[in-house]
Image (cartoon, rainbow, N blue to C red):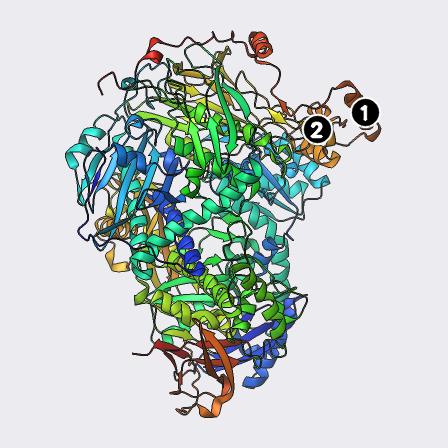
Amino acid sequence: MTDSYRLGVDVGGTFTDVLLIHEQSGALYAAKVPSTPEDSSRGVMHGVERVCALAGIDASAIAHLTHGTTVATNTILTASGARVGLVTTRGHRQILQIARSFVPGGLGAWVVYQRSEPLAPLELTIEADERIDARGQVVQALDEAALRAALTRLAREGVEALTVSLINAYANDLHERRVRDIAREVLPDIPISLSSEVIPEMQEYERTVTTVANAYVRPRFARYIDNLATEVARRAPRAKLSILRSDGGLASAAAAARLPVKHLMSGPAGGVSGAIWLAGVAGHRNLLTLDMGGTSTDVALIEDGRARLRRETMVGDVAVRAPSIDVRTVGAGGGSIAHVPNLTRALRVGPQSAGAAPGPAAYGRGGELPTVTDANVVLGYLPTAARLGGEMGLDVARARAAVQTIADALGLGLEAAAEGIYQIANEHMFGALRLVSVEQGYDPRDFALIAFGGAGPLHANALGRLMGSWPVIVPPGPGVLCAYGDATTRQRDEASRTFIRRFHDTSAQEVAAGLAELAEQARAALRAEGVDDAAQTLAYQLDLRYQGQGLMLSIDLEADELDDVLTLAGARFDALHEQLFTFALPVAKELVNLRAVALGPAPTVRLPTVPVRADVDAARYAEQRIHVEGRAHIAPVYDRARLGAGGVIAGPAIVTEMDATTLVLPGHSGRVDPHGNILITPDA
Amino acid sequence: MPAQLIETNTTPLARVDVDPVTLDIIENALRNARQEMDAVLFRTAMSPGIREQHDEFPLIANRDGKMVVGQFGSFIHGFIAAYDGTIEEGDVFLTTDPYSCQGAISHANDWLVLLPIYADGRHIAWAAMFGHMTDIGGKVPGSLPTDARQIYEEGIVVPPVKIYRRGELQQDLLKLILHNCRLPHWNLSDFNAIVAACRTAGRRCAELSRRFGDDVFHSAMDELLARNRRAMAELIRNVVPTEKRSFEDYLCDDGIGMGPYRITCSMWREGERVVFDFAGTDPQSQGSINFYLNEEMFKMFCGVFMIMVFDPQIMFNDGFYDLMEVRIPPGSLLKPRHPAALSCRTHALGRIFDIISGLLGQGAPNLMCAAGFSDSPHFMYSGYDRDGEWYQLYQIGFGGIPGRPLGDGADGHSLWPSFTNVPNEFLEAYFPLRIDVYETIADSGGAGQHRGGNGVRVGYRFLEPGEISVHDDRWLTYPWGVNGGAPGQRSRKLLRRADGSELRVPSKCDRVKVEAGDLLLFETWGGGGWGDPLARALDAVALDVRRGLVTVDGARRYGVVLDADGRIDHDATEALRARLRDERGPLPLFDKGGSLAEILARCEAETGFPPPRPPEFGRHVARVAGAMPR
């Protein structure tokens, strides 16, 4: 058997992390190179070269290259997508203009509501004369001549991508396909997205928005993937390129380029997958993840080594129907700005952020407003000796001046104001963590908290205390975690179909037969990706609800549970409904979707160990005055690179590494495990 | 006799100092808990009115019943004052009777659930929520009879009762109530969902109380109320003058041939308190358009509106209530006497917001919004389908957000918090109809520097014979413009029969028969315009035209001349703007589309309907409250 390698790549704002795994032995090599924002594929290939050199192999030995990317998300957040044309059914042209008539916020919020422009402008939206009814019957045939004329006008307007979303297309895609065929003649060179392909589900607004979002990010995303694929083909010709999906699965480069809307959460999904894998090695399968960056924080809940999924994805104020790992984002990050409104004199933190530019006051890049990072500096949690991103220094005087404005407004001392900012930021993250745990019926005390991202380890211990979630796990190197996720993700294909039936209108046999058919589709897809049947694992899911409800709950089933599938799934549904909402109902249950999932084998990876070194004194290189809950402490500062397995750091203490700083609070200790993770627990 | 509170732990809660950071944390946590109430409800309710349209209002109140987070302000004190019984841990109360809770809810379709929250045997807070039931029985499907004269015709009315007694559901009672409803499984699951939402809030409050200590939690809620009061006191001092200002607006008709009905409100400041006086409002209607307005709820409407207009940073709660006094004449349209019919109160409820806007805006015209989509038009369709199964749809429509100081009003949006439309594919899958048209109406938004939002045109194609009901307003009086902005276009309904004949449908009616193939065009109204239309940016007008939101003809109201492709003719535009400027008089603060007399005189020619008769007020207006047995 020849040697083969898998490679994971994560592109961050500052660094690109690359991880190489020898598939036969599980041996692992990591490299960190600067990111190249103008064309990320250059940084990626640079990292690939570096890590191959480290392992002493040729890039042609790489069999799988897996990548999580934020390109799709950023395209929406920076409004830099394509000029999208939209085709709707006659009478429904203003679907995005009406946007379900929804005004966010409370009573009277319409007074201040600033509506964002739809991703497909109304002036580029045309109507097709056609109609299909809710049962999929054609009520009115498509007027092809009129459509051709309208498309010609769109061509003159210079649309760069086209979306087709017709009423009831989820029930019959006949007219959408015909529109596509005609559009290909009129607009030969632009990508066309059909709602019946992207998301064949009921609810015209959600389906249209999702399909439009797909069209909007598609040209740029596809270009990025194509560039990367070309580079990969040139340098690592045997490597199969896979892109991480929002739901934590993998898609081929070609599928990703066609359906980028399924990759909006590709980046965070990598972090969550990495956290699952890394914490799993450390023996923790129930986890809360905390990924705190500069402007926002992502949190997720992992139960028994599996992330919760949800059926929609939020990016900014765009909500799309695409399954994603249930990652909740709050606008609290290191750059979040603190302020005190005049009338209420209340302390507020975020959602405005100083971002990377001008950045926190302490960065000395022109930022003057007080941020969470500045509060951390004032409190001494970010020691002046810390090396942010390797080279950046910290301007303590600027940070103090900025936080002083809050202290003055509140009539508090400087440290008390800084502590207030720190705690309010924690409260925002606490709210998000509760959303994924307590509010879903989980007790956070049954979960460990794993923290990453540049700012996560500074707040992790405090949040662990708020949640009662122990230990708090701080893995080494926050960026590399995502690359772990990329490299260790199992191949996964699913097949599903809408199957709306009341329980008493179907039978276990019919459902089992439907699932078997879907299973065969999922297996075939995985076979096509090179995973033979013996290496595959199958799992099943039913989406259920009480008839008349809007929600769906996904119920998991194993292959040997299909004989009595309705009874089993029904009982699990009642129990889950009761857990989530405090009641079950004595009414008919309804099936909505059937789903089969085929999983490839889990890759073997041997996580590197750090040398055993119980003595931590050698790693101690400075002291720092810090403030915790109104009291000053002298905290030793440790260099993480010099800590060994078995070392115990007594809080208060600070641990620094190249791109993160960990705070251990008084009354807590951090123990270094064999893989270099710091596990923080309260002292007995 | 007021309710008697029972606690197993009688240690009084102490008032302690709460540091500002803890206070903010508790405020955030309570806000999260309130959002969680919504989330639980939307996911588990079944009626489209609640699960898709979100016709519901949650709150969390302190021990005394003052709302700390929520939307409509607290009504709990009214319940405590009126409920003659005990309140114990595990109890859950239900009422649907506006007359038994001082108008906390204003028609019997709204089911109000109240839950006292206990921690360690002490009562620490309240959770409450009400939601609109699609049907509660009575004489018409949907239980909103246009021609009702008494509340007894409007379905089942439940006085305040313990629906859970110390944690145990009173099955018989619930069975009795559900037995009176046309769609009992919807009522059951919506009721369960509301209780589950309140229980969620209860758990969160108990957790907070444990985390920070009962005394801190209790004191923090008080302090949050005090903080809001301080901010509002400053706001009131700054924006409410001591001299009296008045504003009036109208409900177009009562659905039984009479109208318009006047609502008048005056406002002035006495020291730090502001007084609102509805003297001059018409007496109660003989029909069902009466709106039993709770004074505290009106304070919340006003307070929220002031906050949104003047300083959206303020978190609103009940803290400022003693800074406002509200006077509503008994026996008036806004304080009808039992047993006046109340079901169609939605028009007056909506109109109150236009009145608040006009009243407050006179002092600060630049911050004033125009008249908006001040109603919740209802559409109902019911009957037996070809399989003999009963179908019944209740749906709320939307229209144009008014022109605002901040910019244009959104087209076809909701003025109510968290409301959304029902997806048309959902309607088509579950009801025998097709939505042939779903669009906003070009030019229906009032012209202005900031344009009013367009109203909505929905084309319902019926696939089965059945009956429809329509409840709407502003077909006669106009959604007014401000600061030189023009009024928006009024509402209308047209039934296009399968045989080609056309029928104008009045704005309020029940039991109109429809046949398979008939098409109802249900058109709501646009928002009023804000500011001088001739000052609107040319590009904005041209873009609206290219988008089909304003027509080439409609653009002339802005003095803008365009060709069919939406290209501006700059010379012609300059000339037209100059001519319009010369011809018109000074710009009015309010443009109501003419005087009421003028509007009535033009009524038949413009709307196809004769003007309504002046309202006759029944003898019950003079009756002393409470003389009739409940």
**Looking at this rendering, what residue extends furthest in the front direction?**
B271
Q: Give the labeled residue for mark 2.
A: B533
Disc sitting over residue B578 in the figure: 1
Q: Quadrant of the C terminus of chain B?
A: top left
Would residue B463 appear left or right of A341 to someone viewing this image?
left
Seen in the picture, residue B342 relative to A78 is either above or below; the reply is above
Q: Secondary structure at mark 1?
A: helix
- Neighbor class of circle 2 (other Cα within 10 Å; few <14, some 14-19, many 20+) is many
Residue A387 shows in the view: yes
Q: Position of residue A608 (x, y in %)?
A: 44, 83
Type of residue at label 2? Pro
Type of residue at label 1? Ala
Q: Position of residue A532 (x, y in %)?
A: 40, 67
- Neighbor class of circle 1 (other Cα within 10 Å; few <14, some 14-19, many 20+) is few
Q: Position of residue B377 (x, y in %)?
A: 45, 25
Residue at position x 78%, y 25% in the image: B577
